[in-house]
Amino acid sequence: MYSVKKELEEIINLYLEKLVSIYTLLDIKYSNDPCMYFFKLKNAGLHDIDNAAAEMGSRMCKFWEYLNSYLGNEIGKYMPNTVSLIGSTLALDFLLKAGSLENLVKYPSSTLQILGAEKAFFNHMRKGTPPPKHGILFNYPGLSALPPKQRGKVARTIANKMAITLKMDYFNTRGNLDGMIAEIKKRMIV
């Protein structure tokens, strides 16, 4: 289901690219949220074909929102501690990459830190390029805004805490999540 959500995001963005000319003609500004602009386009008083295109975009966006909500709720039941730590989208990314919670639990924190950066890791091993500091974790809120020298340290902290929460989820236990989140926030201060 999660891969369907990712593919739907790509389709919506490609669809938006094709409609950019209409937006330009109508002087409608667009940025990162295509769904908002489909709605604006739908209410701009256009010809029938343009309204139909905007309506199709709106329907895709509604389905994407439903899918996003559904997956967020399900992953929250399956991995509540990890979702509390890193969010549902990142937890889904990790789960999709590893294949199962059982596989994720087996990974050490160093593997969790660079999971998703395999190409950069193997380039490091073969060609001696600098090692990757993060993979999927780069999408953790606020991590990409940090100075490059600090990102690796913070990614390591997040991966360490994530290894703990994955085990808590796998063995169905609870722990001090507030302390873990506070420690990550403390490390993120520039």
Image: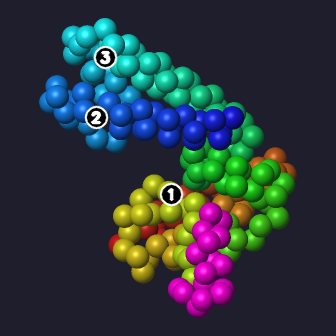
State the image quarter where residue 97 is shown: bottom right
What's the amino acid at mark 2?
Val
What's the amino acid at mark 3?
Asp
Which residue position holds label 1? 140
State the image quarter where residue 137 is shown: bottom right
* Image side of residue 134 versus residue 171, left or right: left
Which residue position holds label 3? 50
Q: Residue furthest top?
A: 48
> Which sits earlier in the primary sequence, circle 3 or circle 2?
2
> What is the x, y in percent for residue 88?
59, 43
Residue 20 marker:
2
Q: Residue at x 75, y 40 (%)?
A: 78
In the image, 178 versus 37, the foreground residue is 37
> What is the x, y in percent for residue 80?
68, 43
Real-space Cα separation, disc 1 to disc 2, in angstroms: 30 Å
What's the amino acid at mark 1?
Tyr
* Image side of residue 180 versus residue 185, left or right: right
In the image, 46 versus 160, the foreground residue is 46
User: Which residues are the magenta region?
Assistant: 115-130
Please tell me whether residue 107 belongs to the stretch shown in magenta.
no
Q: Are marks 3 and 2 in contact (CB under 8 Å)?
A: no
